[in-house]
Image: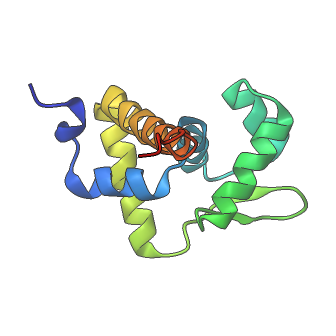
């Protein structure tokens, strides 16, 4: 049986695997994209995501580092993708997420699980010959 990930367009799957580090990161960018008329700060984002202000501040920093958000005044940030191509990828991601939330979040989680397994494997004791 094909995985739900296969229902996602290939370019969206590739973008998720290379550019979306976590579900909270995705949710933050989608919130900012959905309300891009008002600046976001850590307090507002924390309330919208039901998380701590520190976590929201870290997400805003990551969004800026990813060229998805830009500073918009003192401690405020705006959804402003750095290139039209990035904006198009984010739009495609938002559409895929709205149509297939489970596939998108499963793909993010499977990526994280693979990375955790690779990390764990690096510390396995290898039996000497």
Residue at screen point 85% across, 64% down: 73
Residue 84 left/right relative to 21: left
| Residue ranking furthest to the right | 74
Percent across and percent down for residue 6 are 18, 40
Percent across and percent down for residue 91 are 39, 54
Percent across and percent down for residue 77 are 75, 57
Residue at screen point 39% across, 52% down: 17
Residue 76 left/right relative to 117: right
Can you see residue 99? Answer: yes
| Residue ranking furthest to the front | 129
Is 53 located above or below residue 63 in the figure? above
Residue at screen point 37% across, 61% down: 89
Is 16 located above or below residue 2 in the figure? below
| Residue ranking furthest to the left | 1
Percent across and percent down for residue 71 are 77, 65
Residue 60 left/right relative to 116: right
**In this orientation, which residue lies closer to the viewer: 72 or 86?**
86
Can you see residue 39? Answer: no
Q: Quadrant of residue 85?
A: bottom left
Looking at the rendered image, the quarter that the N terminus falls into is top left
Is 34 located above or below residue 109 in the figure? below
């Amino acid at each position: 049986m094909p995985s739900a990930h296969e229902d996602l367009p290939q370019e969206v799957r590739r973008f998720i695997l290379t550019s979306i580090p976590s579900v909270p990161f995705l949710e933050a960018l989608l919130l900012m994209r959905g309300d891009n008329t008002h600046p976001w700060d850590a307090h507002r984002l924390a309330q919208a995501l039901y998380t701590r202000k520190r976590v929201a501040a870290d997400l805003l920093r990551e969004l800026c580092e990813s060229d998805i958000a830009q500073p918009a005044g003192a401690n405020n940030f705006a959804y402003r993708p750095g290139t039209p191509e990035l904006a198009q990828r984010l739009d495609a991601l938002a559409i895929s997420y709205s149509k297939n939330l489970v596939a998108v979040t499963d793909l993010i989680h499977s990526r994280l699980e693979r990375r955790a397994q690779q990390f764990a494997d690096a510390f396995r004791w290898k039996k000497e010959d």
